[in-house]
Amino acid sequence: MKLHNPRQIIIIGLGLFSQTVLGLVAFRLVTTFLSPAEMGRYWLIVSVTTAFAMILINPLGMYVNRRLAEWKAAGSLWHNLERYWGYLAAVAAASAVILFLLNRGNILGLRVNTLWLIALVAGSLLFNTANVTLATALNFFGERWKFVLANNLTDLCGIVFSVGLVYFFSPRAEYWLIGQIAAYLCIAAFAYRWLKPAAPQFAAPRPASEHFSLKGIFSSTVFHYAWPISISVGLYWIQIQGYRFALSHIADIKAVGFFATSFAVGVSIMSAFDSLLSQFYQPVFYNDVANSDQARQARAWERYADFYCPATVLLCAFGIVAGPLLLPLMTGTQFHAFAWLAAWGALTESVRMINSTYGLVAHARLKMRPTITPGITGAAATILAVVFLARWNIFLGTAIALLLGMLLGTFHLAFNMHRLLSVRFPAKRCLLALLWAAPLGLVPVAARLKIPLPNLVQTAVIFLISGAYVLLAQWTLAKPCLTAGNVR
């Protein structure tokens, strides 16, 4: 797969742009219909779902993504995906039992009916994962426009279903989330039909003994790849979402709603870029490292880092500037006083993106154990810092704690990954990106001097000027990668 295909860049770029718009609309609507307390419940339910997904599904999902190209070439894609669907059903059933016990004992403190909680978590584990897996396979196999269409239809249907439910029934977190699950299910069915012609089954029908079994999923290769990831992502969950439960005990559920919503605005700006690059270049990366030696794996990671890391630095500066400006546009009025938290969200998410880039070294080598100890470092630092700093200042203290934990975990991971594979971090290009980003620091200062309280039009103008500058700088930084496929 080639990096410099302009048509594919345009398809993915337009698709991400429309997804970003839909995401902005959805975020504005959910924060308008739901109160801060309901948003707190929303984030806690999402965190519970994410815990099961990250610990029990994400590791195997990464293995599936790592092997998609090989399974397609061998004609065994659907055989392996059937096993994966069976595993998802088993995880959903296990989650139902665990949630029944936890919620009946009021251990989670979610204030959610047990049947509702089981339906929301198990439904998301099944249908969201199926939706994402099928869409990802379309992207990996070159069906870019179908991949873009599936993602956008999922977002659009999610808005329609969720708004309808909270408007006609009740403005509660449960109704918004069940609308999202319905969208995952509907579009997963379309993605399944689109993927069938793109990945034909070459192998002869399997004997009955080869149908899904736990033994097949937990073969030696899969298990040794997946169990360290399961531990690492569990620790990662503590860093990025576990703090919400600590915050709900230190303060209250309304504080969770205010903080998590405002912080998420900055995260979403960075995540939009992360999605664009991941959707376009991760298929290239995984194809490059498939069945390759260490030298080729190192070159593949360096190409990825050359393109990704400098852009992350540049986009971080943009997120710090744009986050506080965008929050009044993206959320209901009750969250506007916390616009400054969006800048902290963008900064912390940029560090997480560098962290995930280093994590690809372990995926390339299929050796995940070196990711565990950095996860312990980051998780322990985050929770300890939240416990102490949130008591000093609920919102600023929590923001500092999340950034500190992510920095410490990332430094530790970088140290381990350099020992695992001899790779070169693009430090010079990141410094160049920092120089390009410097003028963005003048934007909020100049805007505040000239326009202390910008209206909607003035905010849009500031945002567009900053965005245009970032696009110019990003194109200048990325052009060598796009034209030559690598930067030395």
Image (tube, grey):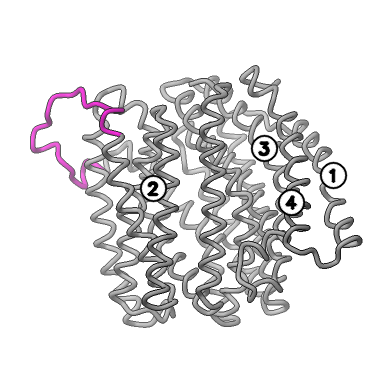
Mark 2 / mark 3, whichever is N-terminal: 2
- The residue tagged 2 is 227
- The residue tagged 4 is 463
Mark seen at residue 266: none
Q: Distance between the residues labelled 4 and 1?
A: 16 Å
Q: Which residue is drawn at 72% across and 61% down?
A: 456
Mark 1 / mark 2, whichever is N-terminal: 2
Q: Mark 2 near mark 3, Cβ–Cβ under 8 Å?
A: no
Amino acid on which the number 4 mark rests in the picture: Phe
Q: Which residue is drawn at 62% across and 69% down?
A: 384
Q: Mark 3 near mark 1, Cβ–Cβ under 8 Å?
A: no
The vertical placement of 267 against 81, above or below, is below
Q: How far apart are marks 3 and 4 (CA)?
A: 23 Å
Judge from the rendering whether residue 85 lies leftward or rightward of residue 11; answer left or right.
Answer: left
- The residue tagged 3 is 309
Mark seen at residue 438: 1
Q: Distance between the residues labelled 2 and 3?
A: 28 Å
Given this view, does label 4 or label 1 mark the residue nearer the observer? 4
Q: What element carries label 2?
A: helix
Give the magenta-colored segment's residue range: 195-217
In this view, the residue in front, 122 or 294, is 122
Judge from the rendering whether residue 224 lies leftward or rightward of residue 368; answer left or right.
Answer: left
Given this view, does label 3 or label 1 mark the residue nearer the observer? 1
Judge from the rendering whether residue 409 lies leftward or rightward of residue 151; answer left or right.
Answer: right
Q: Residue at x 44, y 32 (%)?
A: 144
